[in-house]
Amino acid sequence: MTNPTPEQPRHSDGDAGAPDDGLADHHPESSVAPRGWTTLSVVLVGAFVALLDTTIVNVALPDIGQALSASEETLAWILSGYFLSFGLILIPAGRLGDRYGHRMMFVVGLSLFTLTSLACGLSSSPAQLVTLRVVQGLGAGLFFPVIAALIQIQFTGLARGKAFGLLSAVIGVSTAIGPLLGGLLVHGFGTSGWRWVFLVNVPIGLIAVPAALRLLPRPQGRPTTGLLRSADLVGLVLLVVTGVALLLPLVEGQQAGWLGWPLGSLAVAVVAAGVLWWWERRVERGDGTPILPPALLNRPAFAAGTLVSLTYFAAFTSVFFTLSILWQEGLGHEALSTGLILMPFAVGTLLGIGNGLFIAPNTGLVLSSVDPRQAGTASALLSTAQRLGSAVGVALVSSVLFGTLRIGELDRASAFLHSAQLALCVNIVLVLVSLGLVFMLPRRTAASALS
């Protein structure tokens, strides 16, 4: 899931010379730029495949483990690696799109996503698959910010609302059908079924990339200069170090022993986070453009809402991982039945119940607390929190699930049931933390968002 946001169009760094991808006329009534709906249909295909891959892979994990002799930690990295790289690249990718044109970023990102999907399907080793999943996440993160940006540029008024509504529907459908489609592919193609969970993206990409080259608006004007000066590369590096240093011990800690390097890695994450915060404040005071703007994060409503989103997605996304492993590895069911039992979670999002009751209201609460001119950055940060929360959640839950597994002491089904219960307790704690953070949201913000 992510949050489409109908904010005002803006260039990330406020450069007047940034390319303009066919800006629609700005007036109160609804308007659509030439070929606006065609543009929307193309970019929605990208949204579909990027978020399909957040849920479709779960049901194939047991088959991947058997086919590639992958360890439990590797299975967690297959998911967490995608979420991590997807989330970390979102904000820099948005700025690259503003400067060099959204058409180019969409084509480059979707091409990379398609190529790595093909490579994932042909993987011959666990390390190769994990590496390719990280690169696949980078591809998704490169083109995903373009979708909302082009909607902002191509539509105004009521038409913009309809366009964002269609994006929301595609997001819901892609995550909803992921488990079932994954189960059908694994069931239909037998021992090679897990490969088709990745290969299914290839024909879609082969159609969408040429369509994007032909149909998306070309940038007008020349790209602006000074990208390296204002890109906050130091902040990006520190953010990557923080994320990787945090995930490594969560995934590998049970196997390596917590008193060894995992503890040191956690210390590195804490230090890197502290240095990151110091650096971002320094960049902001110098009129730069920080990756994580302290001015936004110092707003209680925005900070609390972002933490709510991070902890909630850590809980929600990792449930799919636990149930997929339990249902197939522990209880011996097929991938198709796994997809069917996971469907209610995703369908609830489409119907506006369960998960659906959380995402839209939280997005509204968070974005109503910031200046409309900062809505683009705020939305990108919220999406980043969702992806990073998913990565941390899978890493944490997998550590508990596999770290407490005692097959030698219990029969296989009982051992997996016991470990899954403990892992789901982690989900409960994360949800309770998220619920507690909700009460940190100012009542005035909640009232204004709901009115």
Image (cartoon, rainbow, N blue to C red):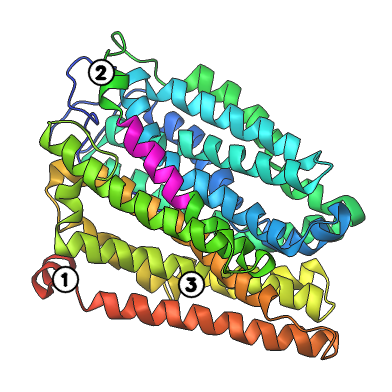
Q: Which circle marks residue 253 in the picture?
A: none
Per the image, the residue denoted by label 2 is: 18
Per the image, the residue denoted by label 3 is: 315
Q: Tell me if I can see residue 263 in this picture.
A: yes
Q: Quadrant of residue 238?
A: top left
Kindly report the distance in space between the C-alpha atoms of the residues bearing marks 2 and 3: 39 Å
Magenta stretch: give its range.
232-243
Q: Quadrant of residue 200?
A: top right
Of the numbered discs 1 and 3, the one sitting upstream in the chain is: 3
Quadrant including the C terminus: bottom left
Of the numbered discs 2 and 1, the one sitting upstream in the chain is: 2
Rendering coords of residue 193 (x, y %): 84, 53
Magenta span: predominant SS is helix
What amino acid is labelled 1 in the image? Answer: Ala
Rendering coords of residue 302 (x, y %): 20, 59
Of the numbered discs 2 and 3, the one sitting upstream in the chain is: 2
Please tell me which residue lies in front, 62 or 349. Answer: 62
Kindly report the distance in space between the C-alpha atoms of the residues bearing marks 1 and 3: 23 Å
Kindly report the distance in space between the C-alpha atoms of the residues bearing marks 2 and 1: 35 Å
Task: Tell whether position 393 is magenta.
Answer: no
Please tell me which residue lies in front, 442 or 411. Answer: 411
What amino acid is labelled 3 in the image? Answer: Ala
Per the image, the residue denoted by label 1 is: 446
